[in-house]
Image (cartoon, coloured by chain):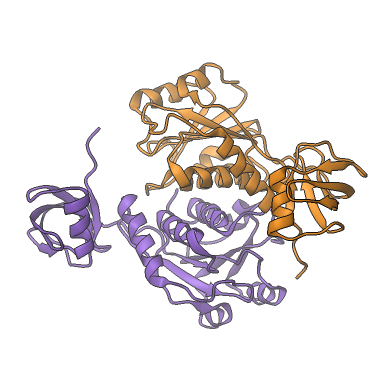
Chain colours: A purple, B orange
């Protein structure tokens, strides 16, 4: 088994010979945790220029310099798939951000609904979780994280070309595959409501939009982070890049 | 919004008028955490007789008695869907057991593969997580938990009538929906390998079985618990009870 190189997300432009300074946290991780030395290799990506193999030029306690040697993978963006979610508490929100990243979402958008418990959202923490999942899972694009928005505001400014899929116990078609298969290729969004569900007025507002598609996720109740992965899997398989 | 009644899994047979003693942990939870009193209501299920509304007859520090009043839901078993997984470490294994329960699995079967990191599996902890997920998500059937088995042993004793679906990066059909749709209705199993994947010999052994179906889960790598939910969602949607 080849040993796995550490994989880091950076914000610098990448090309052969580019010299890139790492953050203090990255320098600490490589030097003090992994005990890498100058000359050791790492993988790096920035969400735009593919994945590169780099070599450590210098490494200190809080500073490290690398030089890019050679591109190991071209950029691959995945589906245009927004993930909208009512924030939930604590550890499950971390998981949700990680999972949506693994499922290829390009935007994580917190949505405030009437039954949302957590009104404040730590978007920095969501970003850190998205970066961690992308680093660990070989993903080349880190999703953007939006600031929290009210559901009504989001619907008001919605681009009607983007299909908004939401998990709905009362969906008119029992088969989610059938409901998704009837749709044409277009930009996508998946909305997962709060643990208590949408209020009837919110559901009505959703159902009235021509760009909204309710789908059923079967007869069992799921936690929000489980429903998120299930819904994103079905959407990827029928309309996204799992084909 | 109606207040949600606490929901408890018990092992006793259930019928109207049955008197059921709760476990010390359940008595503690209802009495000391939720501060319920005699006369208060709870929901109960045993995996066989549906869901019942019960009334607390007595409650002490470590003892509680209930009487079943009326059945609120008939038993509903969900798909015949085994979930086989290479054990992973710590918190993610808890999540995996919870998620497989929410996705309707009726057996959680730890599988030891060559790249399995955790050889010991705490089956009691898996059971507790399955019970917790069933209690919280309104599920009527708690999956059984099997003792850890080597992959080779499982294949040796496999009932060939049960389709064994495994997530495979090199699956011959790119579309998982297409691969699953070509199958007839039959008992099902989903196998999720270790984080490092199966060894080539293990994959070959799997591919040689007439009851094995490899499916692709798209171009991105996922953690094992994410792949589990994604794969179970597709299987439920095409062959299970999400139709």
Does residue B217 appear left or right of residue B37 in this picture?
left
Residue name at image x 14 percent, y 48 percent: A36
Q: Position of residue B177 (x, y in %)?
A: 53, 44
Is A193 drawn above or below residue B101 in the view shown?
below
Considering depth in this image, is A25 or A39 the residue closer to the camera? A25
At x 80%, y 42%, the residue is: B75
Q: Residue at x 74, y 49 (%)?
A: B27
Q: Is residue A19 above or below residue B186?
A: below
Q: Image quadrant of residue B160?
A: top right
Identify the image quadrant of the N terminus of chain B: bottom right
User: Closer to the camera, B26 or A218?
Assistant: B26
Residue depicted at 55% across the width and 26% down the height: B147
Q: Residue furthest front?
A: B61
Depth order, front residue of B85/B2: B2
Would you say B243 lies left or right of B213 here? right
- Residue A241 appearing in the image: yes
Q: How many marks?
A: 0
**Position of residue B54 in the picture relative to residue B208 (left or right):** right
- Residue A82 x/y as whole percent: 46, 66
* Relative vertical location of residue B188 with respect to residue B102 in this rendering, above or below: above
- Front residue of A130/A189: it is A130
Position of residue B42 measured from the top left corner of the image (x, y, whole percent): 80, 54
Q: Residue furthest top?
A: B156
Whether residue B46 is situated above or below residue B210 in the rendered picture: below
In the image, farthest residue toward the right: B17
Q: Position of residue B225 (x, y in %)?
A: 47, 45
């Amino acid at each position: 088994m080849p040993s796995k190189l550490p994989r880091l997300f950076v914000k610098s432009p990448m090309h052969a010979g580019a010299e890139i300074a790492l953050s203090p946290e990255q320098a600490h991780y490589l030097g003090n945790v992994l005990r890498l030395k100058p000359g050791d290799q790492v993988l790096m990506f920035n969400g735009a220029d593919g994945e590169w193999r780099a070599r450590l030029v210098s490494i200190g306690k809080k500073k490290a310099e690398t030089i890019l040697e050679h591109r190991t993978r071209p950029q691959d963006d995945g589906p245009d798939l927004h993930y909208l979610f009512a924030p939930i508490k604590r550890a499950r929100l971390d998981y949700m951000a990680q999972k949506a990243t693994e499922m290829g979402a390009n935007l994580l958008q917190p949505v405030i609904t009437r039954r949302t418990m957590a009104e404040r959202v730590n978007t920095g923490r969501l970003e850190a979780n998205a970066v961690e999942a992308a680093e660990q899972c070989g993903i080349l694009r880190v999703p953007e994280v939006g600031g929290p928005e009210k559901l009504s505001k989001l619907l008001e400014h919605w681009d009607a070309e983007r299909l908004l899929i939401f998990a709905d116990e009362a969906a008119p078609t029992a088969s989610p595959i059938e409901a998704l298969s009837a749709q044409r290729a277009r930009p996508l969004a998946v909305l997962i409501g709060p643990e208590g569900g949408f209020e009837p007025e919110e559901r009505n507002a959703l159902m009235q939009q021509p760009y909204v598609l309710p789908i059923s996720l079967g007869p069992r109740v799921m936690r929000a982070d489980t429903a998120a992965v299930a819904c994103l899997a079905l959407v990827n398989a029928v309309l996204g890049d799992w084909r």
